[in-house]
Amino acid sequence: PSSSSFQPNGASEAALRCEIEELKRKDLALDQEIAQLLSEGYSLGELEKHISLLHEYNEIKDAGQMLLGKLAVIRGVTTKQLYPEYDLELSD
C-alpha cells in the first residue's frame, strides 16, 4: 500500500506540511507575545494563572451554552430567544 493511503482523512502530505508551517508561525507569534508581556512586567506565573482562568471560563461558558440549547429545544424556541429572559447579551 502507498504511504498516501495512511494519511488521516485523506489529507495530502503537502496539506499536512502547510498545517505544520502554520502551527510553527502561531507558536512563534505566541512566543513573541509572551516575551512582550514579560517585558511589560508580567510574571510567567501570572500569565499561567490567567490562561488557566480563561480555560475555566470557556468550560463554564460552554456548559451554559449547552444548557441554553437544551432548554431552547424543550421550549421549542431558539437559544437567541432565551437570552433576554436570563439578562444575557448576544455577545455573552
Image (tube, rainbow, N blue to C red):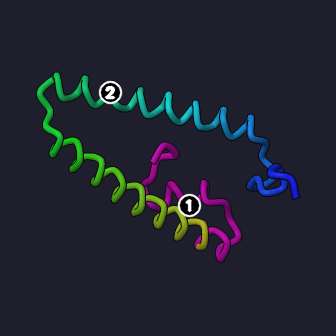
- 54 to 44, vertically: above or below: below
Q: Quadrant of the N terminus?
A: bottom right
Q: Which residue is mark 2?
A: 33
Q: In the displayed image of the protein, which residue is found farthest to the bottom? A: 74
- 92 to 22, vertically: above or below: below
The verdict on residue 88 being magenta is yes
Q: Quadrant of residue 71?
A: bottom right
Q: Which residue is mark 1?
A: 82
Residue shown at the point (46%, 65%) measured from the top left:
64
Asked whether 33 or 6 is in front, the reply is 6
Asked whether 13 or 92 is in front, the reply is 13
Q: Position of residue 37 (x, y in %)?
A: 22, 28
Give the amino acid type for the residue marked by disc 2 in the picture: Glu
- 34 to 90, vertically: above or below: above
Side (left or right) of 31 relative to 70: left
Side (left or right) of 16 relative to 25: right
Q: Position of residue 30 (x, y in %)?
A: 38, 32
Disc 2 on helix, strand or loop? helix
Q: Which residues are magenta?
A: 71-92
The verdict on residue 87 being magenta is yes
Q: Quadrant of residue 60?
A: bottom left
